[in-house]
Image (cartoon, helix red, strand yellow):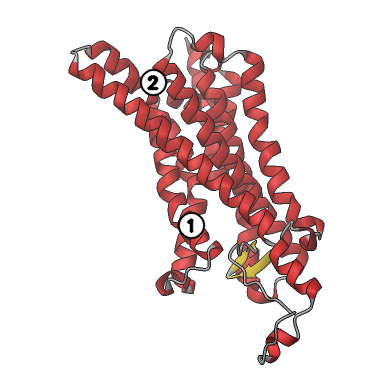
Amino acid sequence: MAIVGNLFYLIALYKSPSLQRRINNYFLGNLAAADFLTGLLAIPMVLIVFSMDSSTPSTICQAQAFLVGWFYGVSLTTAAIISIDRCIIVMEPYQYPHLMTPDRVKILIILPWILSLLIYIMPLLGLEEAGLGKYDYKYFCWLDNTIATKRYDLDEEYHDEEFLNISHDKQQQVQRYNVIALIYLIHLILAIAIIVICYSIIFSIAYRKSLVGNRNRVRGITKSIRTTTSIVGTNLFCWLPTVITTILDMLEISVIPLKSFVISMIFYVLFLATAATNPIIYIWSSNTLRHKVILTLPCRKNRVLDLQQNV
C-alpha cells in the first residue's frame, strides 16, 4: 500500500494541472515521495534486518538505519512545513500568495531532504569520536542516541576496576557521542512543537470565527485544513510512541515496559505505518483527487477509452 498508494497519488498530481494550482498539494506530494521511498527501500531493509536478527551484517544494518532515519526526517520536517503553510493561509489569506512564492515553495520542498540527509548521514562517516554518532543494533538498527553520560575523573582514586581501566580517550569518546543525539533530539522536539503550535492557532481562529457567526469563513478554514489535519494528526499519533521512547532512551530513563521486544516492535511498526495510511487519507478526503487516481488505474483508463470510442 505504501508503494502503490503513494505512486498513484504522485502520478495523479503530475498529470493534473488542477491539483498543481494548490501550493499545499506540492508539500503533500513531497510527503508522498518520502512515504513511497519508505515503502520501496526502507521497509524491505527493515524486514531483512528482522529476519537476520542480531547476525545482520554491519553494512545492511547501517543502510537500514540510514534509510529509515532519512525518510522519517523528511516526513517529520515536511509535516512541520505543511503545518506552517496551513497556519499562514488561515492567519493571512490575502498575503499568502505573496508569502508562498514559487521560489520559496521549491526551497521548502528541497529543505527537508537536505536537512535530514545531513543529520542521518553523519553516523555513517565513522567519526563517532568526533561526536557524529553511530548506528547500533537493538531489536532493529538505529542511532546510538545516549545523551546522559557519566563523567569519570582519573585524577581521583577509584577502587572500582572498571574506573581504572577507562582511558582519557575513552572518556572523550563517550562524551562526544552526545553531539549527534542532541541534534536529533532538537530536530524531533522542534518539528513536533511547530506542528502543535500551528494547529492550535488554526483551531483557535476557527473557534473565534464560529463565535462571531461567520459560518462561511469557518467552513472555508475547515475545508482548507481537513486533509492536512488528518494526515499530520495521524502521523503524530503513529510517531509519538517511538518519539517518546527515543527521548527516554536518550535521557537514560528506565521504563521497564517500554524496553521489551514486543512493545518496541509494535511502536516501530506503527512508526512505519504512516507510509501506508497517508495515501488512504489523500484519496478519502478529496473527491477530485479520488477521481484523478481512479483515472490513473490501467483498467479504469482502458474502460474510459472504450466508452469514448463507442460514443
Residue indicated by mark 2: 224
x then y, percent, for residue 291:
44, 23
Residue located at (70% from left, 82% from top):
156
Instruction: State left or right for residue 260 relative to residue 222.
Output: right
x then y, percent, for residue 260:
46, 74
Residue 302 shows in this picture: no
Amino acid type, mark 2: Ser
Residue 152 lies, with reference to residue 145, above or below; the image says below
Q: CA–CA distance between discs 1 and 2?
A: 29 Å
Single out the mark in the foreground, 1 or 2. 1
Residue 138 shows in this picture: yes
Mark 2: give few (<14), some (14-19) or many (20+) Cα within 10 Å.
some
Lower position in the chain sequence, tag 1 or tag 2: 2
x then y, percent, for residue 305:
54, 18
Residue 84 lies, with reference to residue 177, above or below; the image says above
Instruction: State left or right for residue 206 relative to residue 30.
Output: left
> Which of 221 and 16 lies nearest the eye of the viewer?
221
Residue indicated by mark 1: 242
Residue 265 lies, with reference to residue 94, above or below; the image says below
Q: Quadrant of residue 108?
A: top right
Disc 2 on helix, strand or loop?
helix
Residue located at (41% from left, 34% from top):
197
Disc 1 on helix, strand or loop?
helix
Residue located at (66% from left, 22% from top):
106
Mark 1: give few (<14), some (14-19) or many (20+) Cα within 10 Å.
many
x then y, percent, for residue 198:
42, 30
